[in-house]
Image (spheres, rainbow, N blue to C red):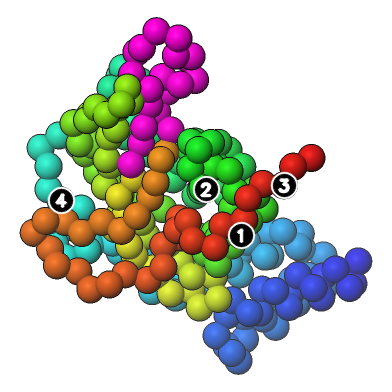
Amino acid sequence: MRHSYGFILAGMVLLLPACDGREESALENLANGANPAVVENTVKAEALSVMEPLAPPAPGTPGGLPITPTPVVERAIDPASAQGAAQVVQGYYGLLEEKRFEEAQDLWSENAPAGSEDAAAFATRFRGFSEIHANVGAPSEPEGAAGSLFVTVPVQVYARVAATGKPWYALRKVVLRRVNDVPGSSEADRRWHISSIGAYVAAETKLESAPAAISATDGIRRKQSP
């Protein structure tokens, strides 16, 4: 057990500023029989308290979502509507926040590169972040093409870089697709799935080029056949 405690403490020390005494306090607590998980959570909480807070730009400001009178509805709605598409986006980023990456990938269309990517590779793109959160904007009106419907949802992603603890912000445009209610379509076809995620620039804001998206689709590896 001594070795496992040392490993835990070594990981916790990385979170703290050097020579502030908290690592010695953590070690003393462990030596006195404290629960390692409790000590680790305490040290993490102390470290986060001195980090730069996550403060995504407000709507209508540079880097913020556009101001809209019709935000995403929280109550029960028609899943086939544009608001239903926005709820899929909310669910997607909620799963990323909880690090449930396989379930998040299931919300992608199987025909999209990220939907057919190897599951481990899909999860790897998010490993550089200790936290991932998002504010979801109002969806566009559905647009039809070739028997399908498309909705675009703006998203403000705010995350924390694991290696540095620094905040990371980005605006994203999530495009969702579902098959229109045509004869022969399945229930799964008529559900919204993510088709693509790319950079989004609000019409009233000219942003500088953003860093690489955590939901980018370049460098994707395909799923291997069993």
Residue receiving disc 4? 66
Earlier-in-chain disc, 3 versus 4:
4
Q: Nearer the viewer, mark 2 or mark 3?
A: 3
Q: Residue at x 67, y 53 (%)?
A: 120
Q: Position of residue 20 (x, y in %)?
A: 57, 88
Judged left or right of residue 97, residue 150 is: left
- For residue 187: magenta? yes
Amino acid type for the residue under numbered disc 2? Ala
Residue 38 in view, yes or no:
yes
Name above or below for residue 100 compared with residue 150: below
Task: Report, in whole angstroms, how far the alpha carbon at label 1 lies from the one at label 2.
Answer: 12 Å
Q: Nearer the viewer, mark 1 or mark 2?
A: 2
Earlier-in-chain disc, 4 versus 2:
4
Q: Nearer the viewer, mark 3 or mark 4?
A: 3
Amino acid type for the residue under numbered disc 1? Thr
Report the span colored magenta: 175-193
- Indicate the secondary structure of the residue bearing disc 1: helix
Residue receiving disc 2? 114
Task: Report, in whole angstroms, how far the alpha carbon at label 1 lies from the one at label 3.
Answer: 16 Å
- Indicate the secondary structure of the residue bearing disc 4: loop
Residues 98 and 52: in front is: 98
Residues 197 and 35: in front is: 197
Amino acid type for the residue under numbered disc 3? Gln
Name above or below for residue 14 compared with residue 78: below
Q: Position of residue 133 (x, y in %)?
A: 41, 53
Residue receiving disc 1? 124
Task: Report, in whole angstroms, how far the alpha carbon at label 4 lies from the one at label 1.
Answer: 30 Å
Residue receiving disc 3? 224
Q: Nearer the viewer, mark 4 or mark 2?
A: 2
Q: Position of residue 181 (x, y in %)?
A: 34, 13
Earlier-in-chain disc, 2 versus 3:
2
Q: Nearer the viewer, mark 1 or mark 3?
A: 3
